[in-house]
Image (spheres, helix red, strand yellow):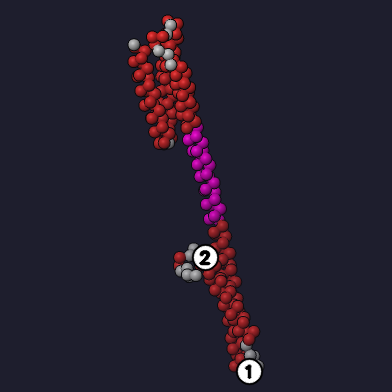
Amino acid sequence: MPSIPVDSLSPFGRMAVKLDTAFSELNRISGQIQRMEIHSDSGLERAVKLLNEFAQNGQTIAENIQEFSRTLADARAKSEAAAHIVSERAQLVQQRRQQQNHIQDKLTQIEQKVKAANASLADFRKHNPGELSDEQKIQIKTHLEQLNQNLADFIEAVQAVKAEAAQAKFKGIERDAESLLGALQASRRKLRKVMEV
């Protein structure tokens, strides 16, 4: 496994590596002390030296643990601060999503009303104008006038949704509203030509 450069680690990671190294050294010294022959002068001197090394290493570990504990407390404080910021941001994201859904729902409702109006117009398209009675012609004229008014209302509603989407910077909804608006305006122009005949 490739070794990770200590410099690339966070302070928390560097402290963990430092502690791990100190523990390994403590275990190494402990093993030497256990195996040390202490019945000779030189062995006894070496054992005393190793005991001093063990004590110094133990002191270093104690200091490193305190530093590690401070680093851990600092990391926890930073983590809690980050979690608080993310929590606040998440609320803003949720509010923004709700606003987007609300505007999208308005546009969808208008689209559904337009489809319903088109469906009701389809019945009148089936008839040949030459086969219509005067009463049917009056009904069609009334229906076309109503449809013209509906189209005007739809156009006004879509313009409001488009403006709301633009203000909120929802470009996708704004483009969809612009597309629907163009189709409605074209339909209204065609309808007016039919009504003039």
In the displayed structure, does residue 128 sit left or right of residue 36?
left
Q: Residue 114, position in %: x, y?
A: 45, 23
SS at badge 1: loop
Spot occupied by residue 123 in the image (x, y as percentages of width and height): 46, 17
Residue 153 visible within the image: no
Label 1 is placed on what type of residue? Answer: Ser
**Magenta part, dominant SS:** helix
**Residue labelled with disc 1:** 40
Residue 82 among those drawn in magenta: yes
Q: Amino acid at mark 2?
A: Gly
Q: Quadrant of the C terminus?
A: top left
Alpha-carbon span between mark 1 and mark 2 = 43 Å
Question: Does 141 appear in magenta?
Answer: no
Q: Residue at x 52, y 44 (%)?
A: 90
- Of mark 1 and mark 2, the one earlier in the sequence is 2
Residue at numbered disc 2: 13
The picture quadrant where one finds residue 122 is top left
Position above or below: 23 against 141: below
Q: Which residues are magenta?
A: 77-102
Residue at x 54%, y 49% (from the top left corner): 84
**Residue closer to the observer: 169 or 56:** 169
